[in-house]
Image: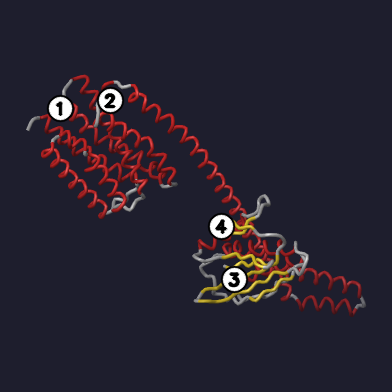
Amino acid sequence: MTATLFWAALNYISVLIFGVLISASFVGTDYTWRNKKGITVFIVVVILVQFSTYFIAGADVASEIYPLITHLPLILFCVYYLKRPLIMSISAVMASYLCCQTRRWFGSIFLYIFDNKSLWYAVQTVVTIPLLFCILKYVSKPVYKLMKQSRKSQILFGIIPLFYYIFDYATTIYSDLLYMGARAAVEFIPSVLSIAYFGFVVLFAAETQKSSAVKEEQRFLEMQISEARRELEGLRNSQAQAAVYRHDLRHHLRYLESCIRNCNTDEALSYISSIDKTIDNSLLVRFCENETVNLILSSYAASAEQAGVDFEAKVAVGSDDFDKASAVDLCVILGNVLDNAINASKACTGRRYVSVETRRKNGRIFWLIRNPYMGEVHFEGRLPSTEAAGHGIGIKSVAMTVEKLGGMYEFIAEDGVLLSDS
């Protein structure tokens, strides 16, 4: 075996390992024992196919059908064995092919200087290890994070490598256009780069706008959670204060008795009035045995009364129910729905009410909240929408929280009544 043939064979093996490992890393492969074994078997099988083709059909045929015996199987391996999306797999394989050109470029420098083909293969083989290390350590994770964002990101990432792949095979493997200096071939890559650049600008602007909208919704949700915590703390303090007043009732009675004995009627009446107001402010109606639910319902019952809206509640919730849901989660769900229901009901001209009811089915608790509304309710998907600025975030918060807890929700508008079922 000549030195050239030895280094050529070693280069074939190293470039295959290089391309397979980079493709696998670009699609975010976890190197478990299963995946390591699968990648090793794949590399061995492809090497056997490549060398068989080389010795049976010759080097030219092996180069021409290389996409069929290497790149296509690698794409299918990523899709069916590594369980990755098709577009992501194609983009990863095309990008790994583009990375292989760096190896070839280093080899071409030495070939140009020394005019030695053995050295050309040897340099490509030697630079494989440091180049592979750098790509796996610094490039693969950002690439995977980019591609897993959306299908558009996968297409954008793979478009230039794909066009280069087609260009390289069309002008160097299946023809000699590039080496002949054909004008169309020389200007092809700059044209593709410019088109891809402007495509990137358009997509980047759209993704940035979408990201800003998501961040704004997240900011509103965080504000609501913070407000929910404050409301719950205030309600607990109010409940504790009411308990204190009930406990101190005998002291109040003794003071009133003293006022009456001393014929100080005005002072007694004034004292009764002040106590009455204080107790009214801290009074919580007992809707159910669950403390958090009771606090929330009491708060919105008071809000409904102030708005002139009848508040009806038939709630059967025990203290052990909703043990997997935090107080903040319950406040976000019930608070947003009840707040919207009260606001919609108080705008009506007929009977204004909010009805809250719980039902149990298959071990689950279902909340049914009804309220009348004026006008027409528009839906965005499954959620009622509003054109008012700054609104609509609450319902999205409800949906997100219910889904987080593994629950279900439904909003139905029928005959002037909006039903919220969750």
The residue shown at (61%, 76%) is 289
The count of marks equals: 4
The mark that comes first in sequence, 1 or 4, is: 1
Amino acid under disc 1: Ser
Q: Relative to residue 56, is residue 158 drawn left or right?
A: right
Position of residue 271 measured from the top left corner of the image (x, y, whole percent): 84, 71
Q: CA distance from mark 1 to mark 2?
A: 25 Å
Disc assigned to residue 381: 4
125 over 186 or under it: above or below: below
Q: Quick one: 342 or 373, which is closer to the camera?
A: 373
Q: Look at mark 2 in the image and give the residue it sits on.
A: 177
The mark that comes first in sequence, 2 or 4, is: 2
Q: Which of the two marks, 3 or 4, is nearer to us in this view?
A: 4
Amino acid under disc 2: Leu
Q: Which of the two marks, 2 or 4, is nearer to us in this view?
A: 2
Q: Residue furthest left?
A: 1
Q: Residue furthest top?
A: 113
Q: Quick one: 238 or 200, which is closer to the camera?
A: 200
The residue shown at (17%, 26%) is 119
Q: Quick one: 260 or 195, which is closer to the camera?
A: 195
